[in-house]
Image (tube, rainbow, N blue to C red):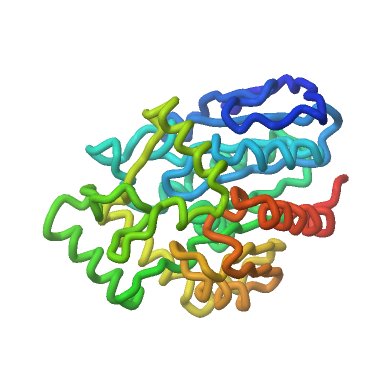
Amino acid sequence: MMSAVSPDPVSPDAPFDRRSIPAGAVVGRWRAPDGWDHRSFAWDPAGAPRGSLLFQGGRGDIFEKYLEAFDHWRARGWTIRSFDWRGQGGSGRLGRDAGVGHAEDFAGWIDDLAAYASEWMAATPAPHVIVGHSMGGHLVLRALMEKRVKPDAAVLSAPMLGLRSAPFTPGIAGVIARGMTWVGRPDRAAWKSPNERPGPPFTPRAQLLTHSADRYADEQWWKVERPEITLGAPSWQWLALAFASCAALERRGAVEGIDTPLLILNPLEDKLVDPAATRRIAARLPDARIRNWGPESAHEILREADPVRSDALAEIDRFLDERAPAR
């Protein structure tokens, strides 16, 4: 079950420490219906809550990376919840190599999200909103499409609705990835570098994620402090599943039935996910607002340099005040 939280007031003048778990927050465990043990995070506001926010990160993410964003939302009255996806962070591993991000099927993650969301919505005050980043945004959209979750609103940050696959088309890249699962162990790493994507050309990982050197260094600090939460390259199986799941979202009729209000944050120069795919899918959603950024933003909008990060948080605040107002 989800952990209860006793909030601690924090001075508004104190600088936020991105390298420690905030006072009053609880890092606990949540057990899925099939018994899988997940690491979870819970943090309640000091005063009366204005609603409840569930944040889910991307492939290989850890919730420590988003403590600063959690602090922003908590200050606005949101109860904050998050959990590490099974197979990454502090939620165990799905393959034989603990450093490889493996998955047998994306359906297990959607099952986890649906089960957690059901408990979360029953235990926390409305309105309920879900924020998903990258792979997390993909899984939130899949769960909405499959009618597995029903929040009052959702935000997708640089969602993985298409993968960068140059020099190949996504279709050919998906075939290659699927073929690689047949000629060797499907849970082996798809590439050897610690980067988020293979080279050449080899772009330093930091440049793929954020223009903020300090926030990037925070992630590295957490991974040194807690090496057990670190994850490297995806497996060939994960890659094949990702291409197939993105292709499924592109099919006519797949997303047109989603009626949840959506805000989509889309960095047009993203080198990891395909912003053109995001724009195509957003245009087919019945109730979606998309906000684009140019070269000033890399993949991790919520961990970008202050001008972009502040702009993104303000955009989210306006959207939630409009579409998920306090009750």
On-image quarter of the C terminus: top right
Q: Is residue 152 visible?
A: no
Q: Is residue 185 above or below residue 81?
A: below
Identity of the residue drawn at 73% across and 41% down = 72
- Tell me if residue 160 can be seen: yes
**What is the tally of numbered marks visible in this picture?**
0
Q: Nearer the viewer, residue 1 or 45?
A: 45
Percent across and percent down for residue 221 are 47, 32
* Image quarter of the N terminus: top right
- Towards the viewer: 95 or 18: 18
Give me the residue at 49% from left, 38% from top.
219
Of all residues shown, which one is farthest toward the left? 183
Residue at the spot x=60%, y=55% of the render? 301
Residue 109 located left or right of residue 140: left
Question: Which residue of the protein is positioned furthest toward the front in this rendering?
Answer: 213
Q: Give whichever of 244, 43 is nearer the camera.
A: 43
Quadrant in the picture for residue 120 = top right
**Is 296 placed left or right of 288 in the picture?**
left
Q: Position of residue 299 (x, y in %)?
A: 52, 58
Image spot of residue 7 (x, y percent): 75, 22
Left or right placement of residue 114 versus residue 191 in this view:
right
Percent from the top left, x then y, of residue 297? Answer: 59, 61
7 in relation to 291, above or below:
above
Residue at x 49% of width, y 42% of height: 112
